[in-house]
Image (tube, rainbow, N blue to C red):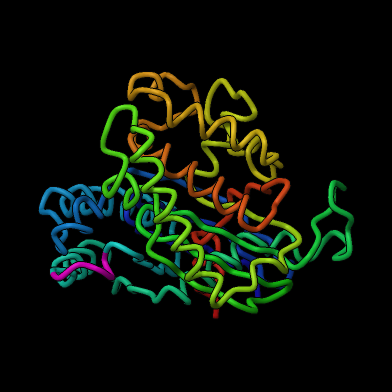
């Protein structure tokens, strides 16, 4: 098979992202042509109302119109649109589906948690599984298998364990938007609010552990915006730089320090952090707390941050 130009859209609870890429299954390479993200907060209040808000739908449709222009301009031959947690939960999800069909000409696939987990694993580990020795010692520059991929979204978090393929997976209702809306309502959040969020996160990890043997993980791979933002802070970057963040290794002590800082900060203090995307200011404390709690529960000394995630997995899946 020759190189093909494909497009992938990942529509989550907090953001909608586009990737247009040239993919070559023979060499296992994926070359970005356009990769972009917009915060649309599709899951706004879904946890409490059970419905997608009209303004959230319009923000999402506006992004879809822009993405359609980019896909057409680059001449992608295949497009797959995957929708995740918010559109699984909403009573009025058909409004969302019909709007996407009208704009992009494809059916949005509301994937199950297990399907979402498999796509995330493929995207995150495709580069890792073909390289370093699977028996690499902790602390070396190689990546020891099996991997535990943790994709912290707005409404859900996926836990996926595997070496060259998925061996166990579970999606749980734990994400930065959901935890913020449920618990972290003060600015900055109170100790009581943080404790309640921590208990909720622990309970969700317990559910994940029923299906995924977390203790088997030798390398923790962290995905999505909350993890990348924590990494950018840890690296003291003057601005967001995906090339610096991709495959950065952040120690648990550094994650703990950053989490405590974010949870103690006001909105304005968080907004002033150079790598902070404006759409993550309100939810980054919860996202960092999820990451830290996962690291502590699995005994991870560090997290390997991947900028390649479910979006890349969706792109690869267009060739199947």
Residue drawn at (15%, 70%), measured in percent from left and top?
A: 91
How far across and how far down the image is residue 16, in percent? Answer: 35, 52
Helix, strand or loop for the magenta stretch, by majority:
helix
- Given residues 153 and 172, the one toward you in this image is 172
Res 315 visible: no
Tell me: residue 199, above or below residue 102: above
Q: Which residue is at a point 38% across and 34% down the rendered structure image?
A: 191
What range of the chain is rendered magenta? Answer: 87-91
- Residue 159 inside the magenta-drawn segment: no
Apparent side of residue 278 relative to residue 218 in the rendered image (left or right): left
Residue in the image at 65% along x and 28% along y: 235
Q: Is residue 174 left or right of residue 98?
A: right
Which quarter of the image is occupied by the N terminus? Answer: bottom right
Answer whether residue 90 is magenta in the image: yes
Residue 120 in sight from this viewpoint = yes
Left or right, 194 with reference to 257: left
Number of numbered labels in the structure image: 0
Q: Residue at x 18, y 69 (%)?
A: 93
Most extreme residue toward the left, as rendered?
Answer: 54
Is 29 or 236 nearer to us in this picture?
236
Q: In x, y percent, where is residue 146?
A: 74, 68
Q: Quadrant of residue 57?
A: bottom left
Give x and y (percent) for residue 81. 37, 67
Q: Nearer the viewer, residue 149 or 264?
A: 264
Q: Nearer the viewer, residue 50 or 106?
A: 50
Which percent across, then down, holds residue 138? 84, 52
Location of the C terminus by quadrant is bottom right
């Amino acid at each position: 098979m020759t190189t093909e130009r494909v497009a992938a859209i990942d529509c989550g609870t907090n953001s909608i992202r586009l990737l247009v890429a040239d993919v070559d299954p023979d060499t296992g390479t994926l070359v970005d042509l356009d990769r972009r993200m917009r915060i649309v907060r599709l899951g706004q209040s879904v946890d409490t109302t059970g419905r997608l808000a009209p303004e959230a739908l319009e923000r999402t449709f506006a992004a879809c119109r822009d993405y359609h222009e980019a896909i057409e301009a680059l001449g992608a031959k295949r497009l797959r649109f995957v929708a995740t947690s918010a559109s699984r939960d909403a009573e009025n999800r058909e409004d969302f589906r019909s709007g996407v069909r009208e704009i992009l000409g494809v059916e949005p696939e509301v994937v199950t948690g297990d399907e979402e987990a498999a796509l995330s694993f493929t995207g995150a580990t495709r580069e890792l599984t073909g390289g370093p020795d699977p028996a690499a010692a902790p602390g070396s520059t190689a990546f020891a298998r099996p991997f535990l991929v943790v994709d912290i979204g707005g409404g859900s978090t996926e836990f996926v364990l595997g070496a060259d393929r998925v061996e166990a997976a579970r999606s749980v209702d734990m994400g930065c938007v959901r935890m913020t809306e449920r618990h972290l309502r003060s600015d900055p959040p109170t100790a009581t609010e943080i404790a309640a969020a921590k208990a909720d996160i622990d309970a969700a990890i317990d559910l994940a552990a029923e299906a995924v043997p977390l203790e088997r993980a030798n390398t923790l791979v962290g995905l999505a915006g909350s993890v990348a933002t924590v990494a950018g802070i840890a690296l003291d970057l003057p601005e967001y730089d995906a090339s610096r963040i991709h495959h950065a290794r952040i120690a648990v002590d550094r994650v703990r320090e950053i989490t405590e800082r974010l949870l103690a900060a006001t909105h304005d203090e968080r907004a002033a952090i150079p790598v902070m995307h404006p759409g993550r200011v309100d939810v980054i404390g919860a996202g960092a707390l999820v990451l830290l709690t996962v690291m502590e529960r699995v005994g991870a000394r560090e997290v390997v941050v991947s900028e390649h995630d479910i979006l890349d997995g969706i792109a690869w899946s267009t060739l199947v």
